[in-house]
Image (cartoon, helix red, strand yellow):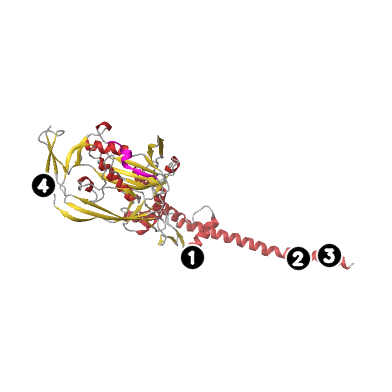
């Protein structure tokens, strides 16, 4: 019985509670609807008031654009663009250069986008979002970040000519041996192309600085290069361990008569493509061979008996002198070298006196020992245009360092009177100077070579004694 009474009372309590709660509930519902309606009406009125202008409290960066129209905002940022239109962007690579202005590259504030974004705040189709934006802007302000324009197509057009000129195709190595001589040799070469992506990254950072700077500025960027590796490197092309250049020497023969030029090129071709084994002593005259008309040499002027005379093979010493310089620069030990009897003008065009070597088949030689522990390849190149001879030695560097002093010149003695020589190869009456007066002198220089650990492995003086040398003129008799 007590249990049934309790249930009855509970039902009455629930009914009374439900009855009395209906009033406040519907009041709250009505109040909320009325509030939202009022707010919506206010927002609609507000939006109509600011239909074509920016709502209050809107900033672009630090610029207040409240109550401004789209056209007014565009004018502001178009004027800013006028102030920076002459800002220049310069790109360089070695001696290549390309320059364009901000206007040419389409760099500036995106006036239309900025104006549209600012004017569109608080005017979306989402009522709640509009309420939040309007309230937030009014109380705390809303800041938009300015946006920029940059025409990447114009930038690509600007640097394209540089790309084309800077591009270098990688070259594969070539190495062909026949009868113990290197018949075909071409060292591999890395290719090059501009890293335009890096330049693009630079522009992306520079655009903002240029636009926000507000005044004319100059931006300079050196475009880096990308190294393009060949498919076949020098090391991969041969089994002799030849990897790189270890030394080179050069000399000019651009005052030579045609026969001498012929002899220089012929001798250089015969002393080339030579592989020198580790520990082997190289002999210049061994590869040079007999120098005569029978072996292809032309008649040219040679030093003989203290004077200039016509003889077979004039110009061969240009070859031995050039190789001598390469051997010195490579730090290789020389076992035989002879200076000329006189200072020869050809060898002092780009070099101080005393760095020459004469040879005379078969007794006067130029020799060195390959102490590098690796094969050495001797290659010559005679330039047709410049009339320059170059010897390059290839092998593998072992860490040695070379120090050479500049030759000292002492013991001067005056040059004799000029010598005039008849030359049947020149037209009659033609006069051509082939040698220039040089005083006699003694020259000396010192060379020190250290191994990779700093230990001295070569420590030597080269002393050359030259008799006075006269100017020589060829007089045409042909």
* Front in this rendered view, residue 337 or 21: 337
**Of the image marks 1 and 4, the number of the one nearer the N terminus:** 1
Query: Residues under labels 3 and 4: Cα distance?
Result: 149 Å
Mark 3 lies on a secondary structure that is helix
Mark 4 lies on a secondary structure that is loop
Crowd around label 3: few <14 · some 14–19 · many ≥20 (10 Å): few
Relative placement, left or right, of 298 versus 92 is: left
Q: Where is residue 358 shown, x and y percent of the image?
A: 26, 44
Q: Where is residue 438 shown, x and y percent of the image?
A: 16, 49
Q: Which residue is mark 4?
A: 417
Q: Which residue is mark 3?
A: 7
Q: Nearer the viewer, mark 1 or mark 2?
A: 1
**Of the image marks 3 and 4, the number of the one nearer the N terminus:** 3
Image quadrant in which the C terminus is located: top left
**Of the image marks 2 and 3, the number of the one nearer the N terminus:** 3
Crowd around label 4: few <14 · some 14–19 · many ≥20 (10 Å): few
Query: Residues under labels 4 and 2: Cα distance?
Result: 144 Å
Label placed on residue 394: none
Relative placement, left or right, of 222 versus 134 is: left
Q: Which residue is mark 1?
A: 139
Q: Note whether residue 32 is visible.
A: yes
* Front in this rendered view, residue 103 or 271: 271
Q: Which residues are magenta?
A: 280-290
Label placed on residue 16: 2
Residue drawn at 73 percent across, 63 percent down? 19
């Amino acid at each position: 019985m007590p249990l049934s009474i309790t249930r009855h009372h509970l039902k009455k309590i629930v009914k009374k509670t439900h009855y009395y709660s209906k009033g406040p509930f519907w009041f709250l519902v009505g109040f909320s609807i009325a509030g939202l309606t009022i707010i919506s009406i206010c927002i609609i009125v507000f939006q109509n008031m600011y239909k074509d202008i920016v709502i209050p409290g809107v900033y672009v960066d630090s610029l207040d654009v409240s109550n401004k129209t789209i056209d007014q905002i565009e004018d502001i940022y178009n004027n800013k663009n006028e102030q920076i239109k002459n800002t220049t962007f310069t790109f360089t690579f070695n001696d290549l250069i390309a320059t364009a202005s901000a206007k040419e590259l389409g760099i500036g504030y995106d006036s239309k986008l900025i104006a549209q974004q600012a004017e569109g705040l608080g005017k979306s189709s989402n009522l709640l979002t509009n309420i939040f934006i309007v309230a937030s802007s009014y109380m705390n302000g809303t800041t938009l970040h300015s946006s920029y324009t940059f025409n990447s197509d114009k930038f690509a057009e600007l640097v394209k000519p540089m790309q084309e000129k800077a591009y270098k195709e990688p070259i594969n190595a070539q190495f062909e041996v026949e009868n113990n001589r290197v018949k075909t040799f071409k060292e591999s070469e890395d290719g090059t192309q501009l890293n335009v992506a890096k330049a693009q990254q630079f522009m992306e950072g520079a655009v903002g600085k240029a636009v926000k700077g507000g005044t004319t500025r100059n931006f300079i960027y050196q475009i880096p290069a990308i190294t393009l590796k060949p498919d076949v490197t020098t090391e991969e092309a041969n089994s002799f361990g030849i990897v790189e250049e270890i030394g080179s020497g050069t000399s000019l023969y651009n005052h030579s008569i045609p026969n001498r030029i012929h002899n220089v090129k012929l001798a250089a071709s015969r002393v080339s493509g030579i592989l020198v084994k580790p520990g082997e002593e190289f002999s210049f005259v061994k590869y040079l061979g007999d120098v005569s008309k029978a072996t292809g040499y032309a008649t040219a002027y040679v030093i003989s008996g203290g004077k200039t005379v016509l003889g077979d093979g004039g110009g061969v010493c240009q070859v031995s002198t050039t190789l001598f310089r390469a051997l010195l620069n490579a730090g290789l030990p020389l076992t035989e070298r002879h200076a000329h009897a006189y200072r020869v003008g050809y060898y002092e065009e780009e070099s101080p006196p005393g760095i020459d070597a004469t040879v005379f088949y078969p007794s006067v030689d130029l020799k060195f020992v390959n102490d590098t522990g690796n094969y050495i390849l001797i290659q010559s190149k005679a330039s047709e245009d410049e009339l320059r001879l170059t010897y390059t030695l290839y092998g593998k560097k072992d860490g040695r360092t070379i120090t050479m002093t500049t030759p000292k010149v002492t013991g001067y003695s005056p040059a004799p009177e000029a010598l005039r020589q008849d030359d049947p190869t020149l037209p009659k009456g033609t006069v051509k100077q082939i040698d220039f007066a040089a005083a006699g002198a003694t020259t000396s220089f010192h060379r020190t070579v250290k191994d990779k650990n700093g230990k001295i492995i070569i420590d030597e003086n080269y002393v050359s004694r030259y008799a006075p040398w006269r100017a020589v003129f060829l007089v045409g008799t042909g």
